[in-house]
Amino acid sequence: MAHSMKAHTILSVGIAEDDSLSLDKILLDSNWQLHGVGNCQEALAFLEHHHVTVVVSEPELPDGTWRELLRSMAKLSAPPSLIISSRLADHHLWAEVLNLGGFDVLMTPFGAEEVLRVTSGAQRDWGGRQIEGLARSATAGFSESQ
C-alpha cells in the first residue's frame, strides 16, 4: 500500500549498485520513490521529463562531475536540490558543495537516519526556493502594473 502513496522522486546519479540497493531499502517505507541513472546526460534527460525535487549524485561521473551536473540543473525551471554521496566525504567536499549551491553531502555506506534527515531537508529547501521564486514573480508583476 505504501508504494502507491509515493509523493516525491529522488534521482540517483552514478551511485554504486550496493549503495543504490541500500538507498532503495532505506526509502522503501517513505514517501520517496527512487529512480537511478548512470551519468550526467541520462540525469538531465530524466529531469527534463519528470518532476524531481532531490538528486543524489556521486562526485565523479562517467561523463562529468557533480559540479557540471549542478550547473546544468540550474538551467531547469525548478532545479532539484543536489546531494553528493561519497565514501570520502570530508570537510573540504562539504564546504565546496555548499559554496557552489549544492544542498549537502551524504557519506556512504548510507545510514537510514541520516538519509531520511538530509533528503527531507533537501525537499524542504526545494519547496522554499519555489515559494521564493513565486513571491519574486508576483512582486515583479505588481511593480510592472503600477
Image: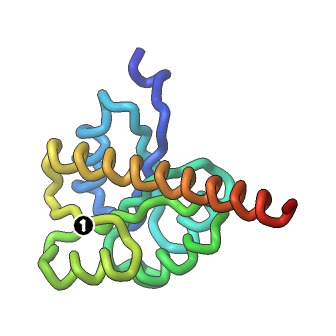
Query: Is 134 on the left-hand or right-hand side of 67?
Result: right
Name the residue nearer the viewer: 139 or 37. 139
Which residue is at a point 40% across and 38% down the rendered structure image? 32
Q: Which residue is mark 1?
A: 105
In the image, residue 115 sits, relative to residue 137, either above or below, namely above
Indicate the quadrant containing the C terminus: top left, top right, bottom left or bottom right.
Answer: bottom right
User: Residue 123: x percent and y percent?
Assistant: 41, 48
Compared with 120, 137 (above or below) is below
Badge 1: few (under 14), some or many (20 or more) residues near its Cα, within 10 Å? many
Image location of residue 73, percent across then percent down: 55, 71
Q: Quadrant of residue 96?
A: bottom left
Which amino acid type corresponds to the residue marked 1 in the rendered image?
A: Val
Residue occupying the far right of the picture: 145
Q: Position of residue 118 (x, y in %)?
A: 26, 52
Q: Position of residue 29 (x, y in %)?
A: 30, 28
Q: Residue at x 43, y 49 (%)?
A: 10
Please state which of residues 105 and 137 is positioned toward the viewer in this rendering: 137
Q: Is residue 30 left or right of residue 1?
A: left
* Name of the residue lying farthest toward the top: 1
Nearer to the camera, 18 or 104:
104
| Quadrant of res 141 | bottom right
In what element is the residue under mark 1?
strand
**Viewer-side residue, 8 vs 4:** 8
Q: Is residue 123 above or below residue 142?
A: above
The residue at the point 42 percent across, 82 percent down is 67
